[in-house]
């Protein structure tokens, strides 16, 4: 089955700096890669996703890149703000089977 | 509000008890899921139902039994609760199974289960 590795487990940045979270996956059949943000006491919320036929996608301050050959994808957050502080999860999905990374706790210091 | 809702939000119970967590979605989705999030925040899928039929059943103890009375509800019943069952359980739904476009999963707010 699919195995998703996520790094780093914790990340602390200064407000205004960029943050990058990286994930690798093992199943070459995975074709959908969402990123979720989980705030304290809440369920994960989708913030951006990318499909295997696309190499990069951007939505305002967040962007995701996908390298299918190397089987890795990354989340980039620019101009970070304190409200970006949360736990971020990557996931890889092949049809019905979606596997999550272990999560990255991002702290943005004002 | 259109959403995925779960009840209860918190559940504290003794070892050996039987408990249920309810999930409802009013998004008109056909597919629903249960995930377990442990103390290290790791999210792991437990079950997935599509239109009341089981399509994913990960290796979970058979003390866990999902029940889907209709496609808007997927309840989780747990028998003979153990200390290791303590976790946050999330329900989720998507329009369909699979990875079609516009088929994202929406998560409920979670149920924090504590077994004493």
Image: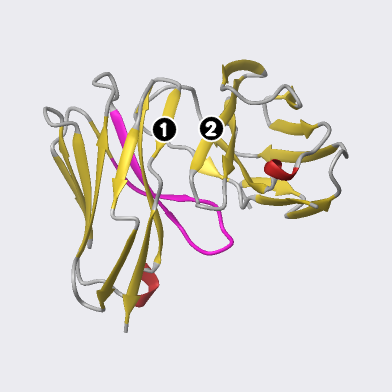
Query: x%, y% of residue B39?
Result: 56, 53
Q: Nearer the viewer, residue A89 or B5?
A: A89
- Asked if the residues shown at circle 1 and circle 2 are in contact, with their CB atoms under 8 angstroms apart, the answer is yes
The subunit letter for the residue under badge 1 reads A
Query: x%, y% of residue B38?
Result: 57, 47
Placement of A101 over or under B78, stated as above or below: below
Q: Nearer the viewer, residue A49 or B35?
A: B35
Query: x%, y% of residue B112?
Result: 69, 53
Write the start and end of the magenta stretch as one range: A32-49
Residue found 48% across the figure and 45% down from its top: B42
- Answer yes or no: are tags 1 and 2 on the same subunit: no
Residue found 34% across the figure and 40% down from its top: A34
Q: Is residue A62 visible?
A: yes
Residue A42 is a magenta residue:
yes
Mark 1 residue crowding within 10 angstroms, few (<14) / some (14–19) / many (20+): many
Q: Report the residue marked by disc 1.
A: A99
Q: Which mark is residue A58?
A: none
Q: Is residue A60 visible?
A: no
Q: Report the residue marked by disc 2.
A: B45
Q: Secondary structure at mark 1?
A: strand
Query: x%, y% of residue B4?
Result: 62, 44
How far is mark 1 from mark 2, CA to CA? Answer: 7 Å
């Amino acid at each position: 089955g699919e195995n998703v590795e996520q790094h780093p487990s914790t990340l602390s940045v200064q407000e205004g700096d960029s943050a990058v979270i990286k994930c690798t996956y093992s199943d070459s059949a995975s074709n959908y890669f969402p990123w979720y943000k989980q705030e304290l006491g809440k369920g994960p919320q989708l913030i951006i996703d990318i499909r295997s036929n696309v190499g990069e996608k951007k939505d305002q301050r967040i962007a995701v890149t996908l390298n299918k050959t190397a089987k890795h994808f990354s989340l980039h957050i620019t101009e970070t703000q304190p409200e970006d502080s949360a736990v971020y999860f990557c996931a890889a999905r092949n049809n019905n089977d979606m596997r999550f990374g272990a999560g990255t706790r991002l702290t943005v210091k004002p | 509000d259109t959403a995925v809702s779960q009840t209860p939000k918190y559940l504290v119970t003794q070892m050996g008890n039987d408990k249920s967590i309810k999930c409802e979605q009013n998004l008109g989705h056909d597919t629903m899921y249960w995930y377990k999030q442990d103390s290290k925040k790791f999210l792991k899928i437990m079950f997935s139902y599509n239109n009341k039929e089981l399509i994913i059943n990960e290796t979970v103890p058979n003390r866990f039994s999902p029940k889907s009375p209709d496609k808007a509800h997927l309840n989780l019943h747990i028998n003979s609760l153990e200390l290791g069952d303590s976790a946050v359980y999330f329900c989720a739904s998507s329009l369909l199974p699979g990875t079609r476009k516009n088929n994202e999963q929406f998560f409920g707010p979670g149920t924090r289960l504590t077994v004493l």
